[in-house]
Amino acid sequence: MSTAPPTVVLGDEFARTLPELALPRQADEAPAPHLLVLDERLAAEVGLDPDWLRGPEGVRLLVGNHVPDGATPVAQAYAGHQFGHYSPRLGDGRALLLGELAHVDGHPRDLHLKGSGRTPFSRGGDGLAAVGPMLREHVVGAAMHALGIPTTRSLAVVATGRPVRRETVLPGAVLARIASSHLRVGTFQYARATDDVDLLRRLADHAIARHHPAAARAANPYLALFEAVVAAQASLVARWMLVGFVHGVMNTDNTTISGETIDYGPCAFLGAFDPTAVYSSIDHAGRYAYGNQPVVAEWNLARLAEALLPLVDDDQDRAIASAVEALGAFRPAYGAAWSAGMRAKLGLAEGLDDAVASPLVDDLLVLLRDNRVDHTSFYRRLGDAARGDVERAREVFLDLAGIDGWLARWRALAPDADAMDRVNPVYVPRNHLVEEALAAGERGDLGPLERLLDAVTAPYDERPGFDRYAAPGPEDPDYRTFCGT
Ligand code: AMP
Ligand code: MG
């Protein structure tokens, strides 16, 4: 007995309300689409039947070749500061927004494709994506979600059967992405640069309705929108710092209004704790080094403030004063989120006096850096120390006197080992494991990717048989993820 194909309902709210930012476009035909990986849980959350998605019509949806009735795929316009330099016209050069899906939580989600062919924003690019980088986005996004960090998520990666020319010829792929939205700081920069204040206002109203509805009730809704984005980004970047995530390309076009992590390119998780760690092969100056991320987020938010000024106040001086004051909330918000997170990582009581907690945290970070201690595994070793087995934490330091002194101070505060294990992951997608999984995936062997996904999607539960996913990789100071994104 055959069942009727499900009706996929894709909204077109973005395309309808912001046509100036939405260029209708069809995806390239994929010659031989082949599903590589599907997040079945996510599919169910957005009302898509995983079994149907695995079938021929579902796979065609995932590459943009089956367009449900009523859907309007569009390339979205945006601008952005890339490594500090302003580009007035970036936009989806190899991506399409297929439309909005209803999520079980009641909030809409974008269904978006990456690698679906050229668009009016492609400039010199081919509009395509390769299997490896799309699998990277899939696994790192899944890991971030499992860690509880706001993120866009990969629904699926489909090999297209079309080769992609990079330094070598690589298999092509399309990533289907689910996001709260694809509104970026760069979307506002683009709208602002048109000098069309009505467009800017419609964009801001759309962002408020979609992400920060409380702002609509504020005395100054657009200032309140800005404040909400400042808060969301401060919280997000604190989460990155606590888990040791390095985004790698924090351009304003890769900074969301929702506060979700977006555009996993040359990203990485820290091995040894090092504020100067850079993993992107194109970030020569270290602009997006691990330790710079909070400052860069604040800088990106200043660019959002500039774009919003005409909506904040008719008087430009007053608008600037309000925006500067609102941006001033970033540092305390970031600091509070990060400090609370560090206390939790150390199993310390929330009410602990700051005069005790702050120097304890600061001194630990100096020890970790100077002794090149692996970020992720250290905090689990410290959990063992909280249970009385201090040797596991001690043994990763050369400066034993230093760590002994620190451990004595910390243990005197009676840290809660079980609470530590609930916030300190065992498994993160370490660089060498990701590289191994992508290389195998490119050869058609998805086993390593599936095992890595298994490990990182339950990151806090230590499980037998997963030891190698918990261990630091070979110390490789020259590790770079090449920007083949
Ligand atoms: P990303 O670094 O992936 O965030 O992309 C930055 C900008 O370059 C965006 O406007 C992308 O759409 C565009 N872009 C990246 N790769 C390609 C490509 N292969 N073809 C066309 N446009 C691209
Ligand atoms: Mg991007």
Image (cartoon, helix red, strand yellow):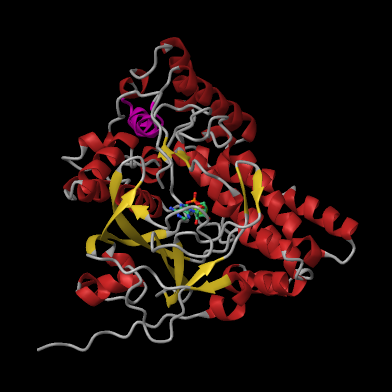
Q: Residue furthest left?
A: 1
Note whether 201 is above or below 442 in the view shown: below
Which percent across, then down, holds residue 97? 46, 69
Which percent across, then down, holds residue 24? 50, 75
Along the horizontal axis of the image, is 257 left or right of 267?
right
Q: Nearer the viewer, residue 49 or 146?
A: 49
Q: Name which residue lies at 68% across and 58% down.
A: 189
Along the horizontal axis of the image, is 323 left or right of 431?
right
Q: Residue furthest front?
A: 124
Q: Would residue 431 be visible to someone looking at this image?
A: yes
Quarter containing the N terminus: bottom left
Q: Would residue 458 be visible to someone looking at this image?
A: no
Q: Name which residue lies at 35% across and 82% down.
A: 8
Magenta run includes residue 382: yes
Name the chief secondary structure element in magenta.
helix
Note whether 469 is above or below 285 in the view shown: below
Residue 338, picture quadrant = top right
Along the horizontal axis of the image, is 388 left or right of 96?
left
Magenta run includes residue 4: no
Residue 427, picture quadrant = top left
Q: Nearer the viewer, residue 239 or 449?
A: 449
Which percent across, then down, holds residue 11? 47, 81
Which percent across, then down, holds residue 300? 65, 48
Along the horizontal axis of the image, is 59 left or right of 371?
left
Q: Nearer the viewer, residue 396 or 476?
A: 476
Residue 89, picture quadrant = bottom right
Total labels: the figure holds 0
The stretch in magenta equals 374-389
